[in-house]
Structures are given as C-alpha cells and as structure tokens.
Image (tube, grey):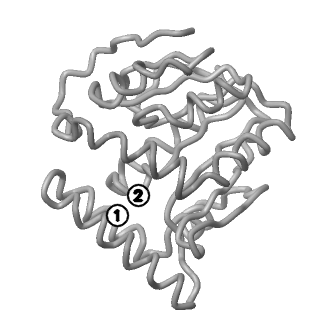
Amino acid sequence: MNSTHEGTHTGKDPYRHFGRGLILLDWMHRYLLPRAGRDVEKILRDRNLSRVLDVACGTGYTACRLARGGFAAVGLDLSPSMLRHAAAKREQGNCAFLIANAGWMPFNKAFDAAAISLALHEISAADREQVWAEMTRVVRPGGLLVVLDFTTPGRSLYCRLIAAAIEWVEKGALKIDPPHYINSALFRDGGGLRTWLEERDAEIVGESSYLGGNVGLFAVAVG
C-alpha cells in the first residue's frame, strides 16, 4: 500500500501556503512528543491491533511510524499539500494515503483502530462531533480510538510556560486560518480533550500526558 490516492475534494486547502514549513510538524512529533509515538504503538500492540487509520494525518508522521513498526496503516487528510509531503517520505513502508473528508470517510468497520493527533482542537464543535462519529463507525467492535490533543495543564511554572508557548503557536494560525485559533481556544478553555471525552461518556482505557499535562493521549474503547 505504498501510494497516494486522490479523492474528490476540490475545496480550499488552508495549508497550501505552508510549503517547507510543513517539516515543522514532523519536528514537533519527533522531538517534542517522541514518547507519545512510542505509547501509541504500545497501546496497539498490547491489544493486537494491526489495521490502523490515521485520521487528519497531516504530513503522515504517525502513519509512517506505524507502518515502519509493522502495522498496516492508512493516512487520511483533506489537504493535498499535506499528503504530497506525506507521500514523499521514502520510509513509509506499508502505508497508503487518501484525500478525503474525515467527516465522511469511505470505510465501514474496516480498521482495528483509528488515531487522530492534534487535530480535533482546530475544527468546529459540530465538525468535531461528526469526525468522532465517523472514527467510531469505521472501527470494528472491540477496537480503539487513540486521540492525542490539548488537555488541562498542571499549575507548575513549567506547565504554565508550555501552555503559554502553545497559545503563542496557536495564535499564529490567525494569519492563515482564523477559525483554527478560535476553535482551539474554545476547546482548551472548555477543559481540553479529557473533559470533551468525559462529556461524551467515552470509555477511556488508557491515558498518558506530555509537556506538563498540556497534551494528553487517550485510548477509547469501541463497543
């Protein structure tokens, strides 16, 4: 599955101006959140889950990492710019990429798990619900949803400094995609990922935190 498949998306690509700046997304995963990648793999291995959908995969870092680890990974994203960057990686291995809307995915119970990293916070509340429903729909019963996103930080100076840095980075989106920052601010002000999952009665079966509690990883069971 070493390919990229074009979908029917013809809308605006908010990432088309990022260019070489897209490499910063890989840098963030590799150097700021390396433990998160290892934890995702461990969660999947511990439950013998092999077919994984990386939703809103961006530059394909997570999908490629999973493929190198022996998983059958598919990366899905709405941005052609992101997927061109993802497909250019030589190490992608057993990994395919698909241009499609995460709110209307062309699968049905096709995966053991679906993962989404640092993407739920940037979309509207309504779209967030739709993406979550779709992720649940495309994963077989007994599988997992694995989510990495912003959550409530601790109160130490380190935690608050990281939170301030995240706010500074997120504000940068105002120049390119203002709704991104608005959605992110509302998501974080509402308690972040843990609160969002709890409000939906999600069955959380695994949890880890990073960057002073500003980022959390949650594994949610699919019934």
Residue at far bottom of view? 156
The C terminus, quarter of image: top right
Q: Measured from the top left, where is residue 100 in percent x and y? A: 37, 24
Which structural element holds mark 1?
helix
Q: CA distance from mark 2 to mark 1?
A: 5 Å
192 left or right of 111 in image: left
Disc 2 marks a residue whose amino acid type is His
Quadrant of res 195: bottom right
Contact (Cβ within 8 Å) of mark 2 with mark 1: yes
Q: Position of residue 94 (x, y in %)?
A: 62, 15
- Crowding around mark 2 (Cα neighbors within 10 Å: few <14, some 14 to 19, many 20+) is many
Q: As displayed, is residue 190 above or below residue 157?
A: above
Q: For mark 2, give the secondary structure.
A: helix
Q: Nearer the viewer, residue 78 or 209?
A: 209
Q: What is the quadrant of residue 193 in the picture?
A: bottom right
Write down the residue under mark 2: 121
Is 23 situated left or right of 203 in this image? left
Q: Position of residue 191 (x, y in %)?
A: 50, 75
Q: Looking at the rendering, which quadrant does residue 143 occupy?
A: top right
Mark 1 packing: few (<14 Cα in 10 Å), some, or many (20+)?
Answer: many
Using the image, determine if residue 159 lies above or below residue 203. Answer: below
Residue at 51% x, 47% y: name it. 117
Between disc 2 and disc 1, whose residue precedes? 2
Q: Nearer the viewer, residue 3 or 185?
A: 3
Q: Which residue is mark 1?
A: 184
- Seen at 42% across and 19% down, the residue is 87
The outermost residue toward the left is: 175
Q: Residue 3, percent across and down?
A: 47, 9
| Residue drawn at point x = 57 percent, y = 90 percent | 156
